[in-house]
Image (spheres, grey):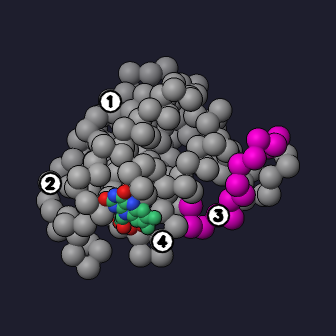
């Protein structure tokens, strides 16, 4: 089994995306699947400007290595302006070459349920830039799924399980390096 990296793409200290990812971690742990976690709040990432890797600070280089070392990703995507958050886009700009031909699951966390199509932007970016295939279902959450920042909608946990199983199925079917 290849290594899964979960990616938390919100910089908010009160992030709901982080809360959904914590449930993803519960699900992976219950299935005895090893994973690493990348929370963008805990790294001092520089903005991508196209320079060589060696020109970035140590945190940025560490994060790029984490992306390279993983075989699959679970992206926690906060919806900003109908699309992915700036910090998450910056991470992809910095590290897209390390993602090539891998697989990913997505959880897309918005304020409103009407914003669910924002996840299509992430699907498109990953596929066109790095040939990353995303699995379905995508886990969509919005404000009404939470109370005091905890998930209160049991459908969310069922979707998480289905997404994780879809990802594990894709990994099982691959020859891992
Ligand atoms: C700059 C900004 C833009 C946002 N744009 C949208 C949007 O287009 N659609 C939406 O449903 N929610 C939008 N929201 C709400 C966030 O998606 C929501 O607060 C979500 O919980 C953010 O994830 P987080 O709690 O992990 O930070 C926006 C929030 C911010 C701060």
Q: Which mark is residue 155?
A: 2
Residue at label 1?
169
For marks 2 and 4, give the one nearer the viewer.
4
**Does dot 4 land on a helix, a strand or a loop?**
loop
Disc 3 and disc 1 in contact, CB within 8 angstroms:
no
CA neighbours of label 3 inside 10 A, class few (<14), some (14 to 19), many (20+): few
**Does dot 1 land on a helix, a strand or a loop?**
helix
Q: Does the residue labelled 4 lie within 8 Å of ligand 1?
A: yes
Q: Can residue 41 be seen in this view?
A: yes
Instruction: Pinpoint residue 45: horizontal percent, then vertical percent.
Output: 68, 59
Q: Residue at x 48, y 75 (%)?
A: 13
Ligand 1 found in image quarter:
bottom left
Residue at label 4?
12
The disc, 2 or 4, on the residue closer to the chain's N-terminal end is 4
Q: Is residue 17 visible?
A: no
In the picture, measured across the screen, residue 79 lies left or right of residue 130, that is left
For the residues labelled 4 and 1, the Cα–Cα distance comes to 32 Å
- Which residues are the magenta region? 40-53
The C terminus appears in which quarter of the rendering?
A: top right
Q: Residue at x 70, y 54 (%)?
A: 47
Residue 47 is covered by the magenta coloring:
yes
**Residue 43, quarter of picture:** bottom right
Q: Which residue is drawn at 23% across and 52% down?
A: 114
Instruction: Pinpoint residue 136: horizontal percent, then vertical percent.
Output: 28, 34
For marks 1 and 2, give the one nearer the viewer.
2
The disc, 4 or 1, on the residue closer to the chain's N-terminal end is 4
Disc 4 and disc 1 in contact, CB within 8 angstroms:
no
Residue at label 3?
43
For marks 4 and 1, give the one nearer the viewer.
4
CA neighbours of label 2 inside 10 A, class few (<14), some (14 to 19), many (20+): few
Q: Does the residue labelled 1 lie within 8 Å of ligand 1?
A: no
């Amino acid at each position: 089994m290849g290594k899964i990296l979960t990616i938390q793409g919100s910089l908010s200290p009160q992030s709901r995306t982080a809360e959904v990812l914590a449930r993803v971690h519960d699900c992976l742990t219950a299935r005895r699947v090893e994973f690493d976690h990348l929370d963008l709040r805990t790294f001092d990432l520089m903005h991508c400007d196209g320079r060589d890797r060696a020109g970035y600070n140590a945190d940025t280089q560490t994060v790029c290595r984490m992306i390279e070392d993983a075989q699959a990703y679970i992206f926690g995507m906060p919806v900003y302006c109908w699309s992915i958050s700036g910090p998450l886009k910056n991470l992809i700009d910095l590290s897209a070459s390390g993602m090539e031909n891998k697989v990913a699951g997505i959880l897309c966390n918005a304020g409103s349920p009407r914003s669910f199509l924002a996840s299509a932007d992430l699907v498109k970016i990953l596929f066109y830039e790095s040939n990353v295939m995303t699995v379905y279902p995508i886990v969509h959450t919005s404000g009404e799924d939470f109370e005091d920042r905890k998930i209160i909608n049991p459908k969310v946990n069922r979707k998480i399980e289905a997404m994780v199983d879809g990802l594990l199925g894709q990994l099982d079917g691959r020859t891992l390096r």
